[in-house]
Structures are given as C-alpha cells and as structure tokens.
Amino acid sequence: MIEMKVSVLEPGANQDRLFRTTRNLQERVQETRVSVRRPPAVVPAPPGTRAGDIATIGEFVVAVQAAVPVVAAVVRAVRQWLADSAQPARKVRVEIDGDVLELDAATPEQQDKIVDGFLRGVLDRHERGEAD
C-alpha cells in the first residue's frame, strides 16, 4: 500500500474556507474508490475560538495500492478538481514517501510531464522495495 498525503494550499484562506475546500477535494478523490482519512484534529474551531494548525486543516491521507492505474486515478481526480477551481492561486501538494508533487495552474501539457515523472519515480521505488 502507498499512503498519499494530499494538502490544499490557498494563500489568504481562513480555516473555515480551507476546511470546506479540502473537504470538497476529499469527496472528489473518494469518487476514485480509495480509502481516504483525515489526520486528527481537523475539525474547524467553533466561532470565536482558535483552532490548531491551519496546514493540518488542509490535509488528508489517501491509502492506495502501489499500482500505476490507482495512483494515477487519484492524481487525475486532484488535477480535475484543481482545473474546475475558480482560484488560480490554489495549489495541491501530493506527497508519497518524501517525493512531492505540487500541482497548480500549469498548462495540462506541463502537468502531464510533471505527473508522469513523479508517478514513474514513486512506483519504481515501490517495486524495488525502496519505499520508506
């Protein structure tokens, strides 16, 4: 199994907005029929109170089989969600065993090259048993 840490990065977003945005992406990723879980303590704070780390609010973890089609389906879901977004400054960071893929408003062709290289590297390491 591979664990993918997915983080939504949106400069200027408050905790509530980041929570809702991340929840929306999480639902999109779940459509690929993968196991999604949120890290502990990611519920937004009640109005008038302070919550924990805003970065944690924008994160969730996806557990998938170490297979190209499965990992690629999750990345495609993230890319499509990002493309549908009306927030050009929004980015999504995907981390697998220390390898990081950051998706943003790059052209589809640029993203294809970046994603292909990322997936090859991560999955090659898993096949060779070099994953953390």
Image (tube, rainbow, N blue to C red):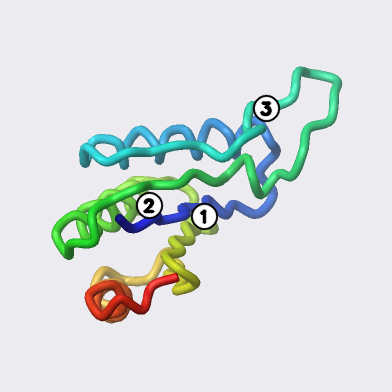
Residue type at mark 2: give it.
Leu
Q: Is residue 53 shown left or right of residue 82?
A: right
**Quadrant of the snapshot with the N terminus:** bottom left
Q: Quick one: label 1 or label 3, which is nearer the N terminus?
A: 3
Q: Is mark 1 on a helix, strand or loop?
A: loop
Q: Tell me where residue 30 appears, x and y as whole percent.
A: 30, 36
Q: Mark 1: few, some, or many residues within 10 Å (few <14, many ≥20)?
A: some
Residue 99 falls in which quadrant of the image? Answer: bottom left
Q: Nearer the viewer, residue 95 or 86?
A: 95
Residue at the spot of label 1: 90
Quadrant of the image containing the C terminus: bottom left
Q: Which residue is drawn at 38% across and 38% down?
A: 36
Q: Which of marks 1 and 3 is in front?
A: 3
Task: Name the residue beneath numbered marker 3.
Answer: 44
As measured in the structure, the alpha-carbon distance from the residue carrying label 1 to the one carrying label 3 is: 20 Å
User: At 42% from the left edge and 34% from the top edge, which residue is drawn?
Assistant: 24
Question: Which label's residue is closer to the chain start, 1 or 2?
Answer: 2
Tell me how many marks there are.
3
Checking the image for residue 82, the label placed there is 2
Residue 100's spot in the image, x, y percent? 46, 71
Q: Where is residue 48 in the image (x, y as percent from the top left)?
A: 85, 20
Hey, which residue is sitting farthest left in the picture? 69
Residue that appears at 58% across and 44% down:
58
Identify the amino acid type marked 3. Answer: Pro
The residue tagged with tag 2: helix, strand or loop?
A: helix
Do labels 1 and 2 touch, CB within 8 Å?
A: yes
